[in-house]
Image: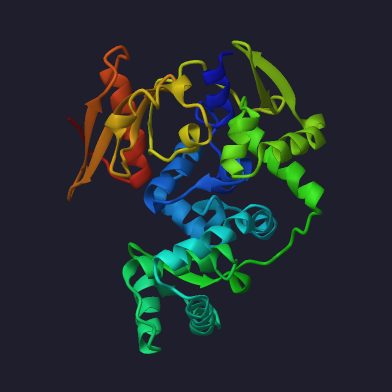
Amino acid sequence: MTLISQRLSQQWLSSSLLTWAVDVVQHFGCMQAQDYHWATRAIGIRSGQSYQTITETIAQWKIIRTRPMRGTIHFLLPQNVHWMMDLCASKMLGSFAWRREYLWISDKQATTALDLLDEMLRGGKQMTRKQIAHYWEDKWIALKKQRIYHLLNYAATKKLICFGPRKGNEDTFVLLNEWVNKPLQPTREEALIKLATMFFRAHGPATVDDMARWTKLGKTDCRQWIAWAWKMLIQQEYEGKTYIATPPTWGEKTWHQSWEIFFLWAYDEFFLGYKDKLWNSLAIHQTQYAKNGTFWPLVVVDGNIAGTRKRTLLKDKIRIQINHLDQNIALSSSHMEKAAHSYAQFLWINTIEII
């Protein structure tokens, strides 16, 4: 198997056996979830479940959305929230001081804002960003949009809050310790072994640099953790470079060799889980799939970027506009329709238009 085909398998993109949303998140450990809708699609394309089913699973607190690493929003399982945040999110706390200084927020104001946040959410309350902003303003804390975002991010990184059930298209926030129990309390060594195994299980074959980038932890530490977890890992060589993976544990899962076409979102773990992106042409087309910090969802053929796409939801159908980036990669109309149909099923929409 090639590097790309192994990663497609490990990432559960080329699996022909459907599974559950919780299984997908458990397999990855953490899945990027900045955009709620597209993050649920990342689960859906790997599980075959619909947006509604995955949203219900999240609403039942079987999957948590918070900021466990790199200051970025991820999906993870409840039992992994506390130990993973203690290990990774805590490393980000030092970066908030200079940002507060830039936003003219004093340490005293930040402490007061978080105390009020704890007060307003206590008792299982769920509040939107706007409701929290109004509460702060009523307490004579005048905050602009960037300051609100910063303080909510800070509160999540300190394990005070996490995202709660959605209200329509709006996120809500809840107190983490009221909604998420702390069942797993591994030792530091056990946690580091779990983290290393978790990363290479879903992203392998990958490198030490990839793991360091994913966790935002030092390469020296990552090498030590890999050594501790070595009984559960294997080493492979590709073009003179060393890669690490977990042994195949696919069991009854069957993996097909025809990858066809996938509609992936721009922040999918298949791309952002690696430091070196030349292997899948991500860097080559970067100026065409990203602009001013906005990333477009991707059309992927055999693990390589073929184009970007734009989705428009109309009254009775879904319209998908394709921007073909790499003319060397063929976009079969039948495979395009299959990929579009899969996405329409995810949304429970019957009619598709591809332009």
Tell me if residue 161 comes above or below residue 32 in the rendering.
Answer: below
Q: What residue lies at 52% left-to-right and 56% top-to-bottom?
A: 57
* Residue 260 position by quadrant: top left
Q: Quadrant of the C terminus?
A: top left
Q: Is residue 120 left or right of residue 306?
A: right
Residue located 39% across and 69% down the image: 147
**The residue positioned farthest toward the bottom in the image shown:** 139
x, y (%) of residue 332? Answer: 29, 17
Side of 140 where 155 appears, left or right: right
User: In this orientation, does residue 107 appear?
Assistant: yes
**Is residue 64 something that shows in the picture?**
no
Residue at image point 51% right, 82% down: 112
Q: Nearer the viewer, residue 320 or 30?
A: 30
Q: Please provide percent x and percent y for residue 146.
A: 35, 65
Above or below: residue 355 compared with residue 328: below
Q: Residue at x 79, y 52 (%)?
A: 188
Tell me if residue 330 comes above or below residue 212 in the rendering. Answer: above
Q: Is residue 193 above or below residue 142?
A: above
Q: In front: 5, or 147?
A: 147
Question: In front: 184, or 228?
Answer: 228
Q: Give residue 96's position: percent from left, percent from top.
A: 51, 62
Q: Residue 177 in the image: x percent, y percent? A: 63, 71
